[in-house]
Amino acid sequence: MSIQRAGAAGSRVQKLVSRTGLQPVPRPGAFGSMAAAPVDQILVGDCIHSLQSLPEASVDLVFADPPYNLQLEGGLTRPDQSEVDAVDDDWDKFASFADYDRFTRDWLSAAHRAMKPDATLFVIGSYHNIFRVGAILQDLGFWILNDIVWRKANPMPNFRGRRFTNAHETLIWASKGANAKGYTFNYEALKAGNEDCQLRSDWFFPICTGAERLKDAKGKKVHPTQKPEALLARVMMAASKPGDVVLDPFFGTGTTGAVAKRLGRRFIGCERDPGYIAAARERIAAVEPLPEAAFHTPLPKRQEKRVAFASLVEAGLIAAGAELFDEKKRWRVVVRADGAVALGDIVGSIHKIGALAQGLPACNGWTFWRCVENGAEICIDDLRARYRAAAPGEE
Ligand SMILES: C[S@@+](CC[C@H](N)C(=O)[O-])C[C@H]1O[C@@H](n2cnc3c(N)ncnc32)[C@H](O)[C@@H]1O
């Protein structure tokens, strides 16, 4: 949430809001274990029941922005006495930490069941709740992969001047368990978009303001804690693939749904407030998906099928007898009909000969050697990419 205020544990009783009346919550297991998940839909009602109704192991990614249990006591004013639009909604109120913990355990268990074995979960929170959420998800067997600090470019000041400006929120990223393998992390694409540097666990985004912030006819915020789309886009581009099902148990105004649709993912949202649901539906309907090239994620290099250099020769992408050379043209080798290369009398693979020429223990021949094609110099790795694109099923 973008609005924080400190305080002791609230004593106000959580009012479980049941304001929807739109359609009944499906009964647990309603969608069956083999049934298709209800994608691109908002499940109306209490999220725990909705999550329990989903087919087991049916979602690829969970993004959860649960109530933070902010424990606000009384109104908050700015120095000019104007009132701060704080999060004082019923859905954020719990009678005690024990109540909050019980709720957290219930929704996390239900989400765990709905996750595929290789799915991951992001849960966002502030100091009010994130430590409790973190302990509970570890108790439930989730395995924490990272904690990510979302540093806010434009945090709200601490109006009373009694504490540091609370300028960040924390996202916990977790897999289903310590042994969960094969989860999606688009490492190379993220690195490519980050000046070829590994993406760090501290993210810098503004809170949701301006045209992106949904307002009602009177100009009032539709939702007190609407998340920025850039944050959701980062989460989905990092940890999901096009076509994946992204589940959001606390859908609010549908930020997850809007971003999922734009990025070629599918969503399932749970929400019980009819006003937020209506806003989310309208918002998502207006979203135009991006062209696929804008979100397509190439396979990580280590998952790409191996290609033998000989296959390129056999496919006619490079001719036997052609010459390969390095970027600075210090060495030249001849491509042999069997897919090896010859440096004078020495015959070996593109990698071995590349290493030998440079006096190094190893060399990636694909990126080291170049050739001439139609009068232009190209790296032989480009030929390999062309080969893979033409024969994706080949070993
Ligand atoms: C922190 S807000 C999520 C805001 C959302 N990420 C967005 O960008 O609009 C939490 C949402 O969860 C909903 N909520 C809280 N408890 C719920 C429950 N038990 N079942 C379903 N929805 C719930 C609230 O109505 C609220 O909209």
Image: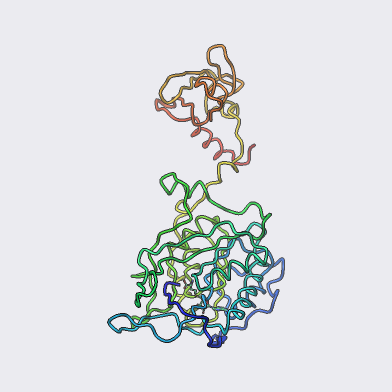
Residue 186 coordinates in the image, percent (x, y): 53, 50
Identity of the residue furthest to the top in this view: 345
Residue closer to the observer: 115 or 15: 15
Residue closer to the observer: 324 or 105: 105
Which quadrant does the C terminus fall into?
top right
6 above or below 190?
Answer: below
Identity of the residue furthest to the front in this view: 162
Drawn side of residue 297 relative to residue 101, left or right: left
Q: How is the image coloured?
A: rainbow
Which quadrant does the N terminus fall into?
bottom left
Which residue is pictured at 66% across the width and 52% down the height? 181
Which residue is pictured at 45% across the width and 62% down the height? 150
Residue 161 coordinates in the image, percent (x, y): 35, 75
Identity of the residue furthest to the left in this view: 80
Drawn side of residue 181 relative to residue 189, left or right: right
Residue 260 coordinates in the image, percent (x, y): 50, 63
Residue 214 coordinates in the image, percent (x, y): 39, 75
58 above or below 338?
Answer: below
Label tally: 0
Residue closer to the observer: 371 or 132: 132
Which residue is pictured at 62% across the width and 83% down the height? 24
Drawn side of residue 33 relative to residue 310, left or right: right
Residue closer to the observer: 45 or 185: 185
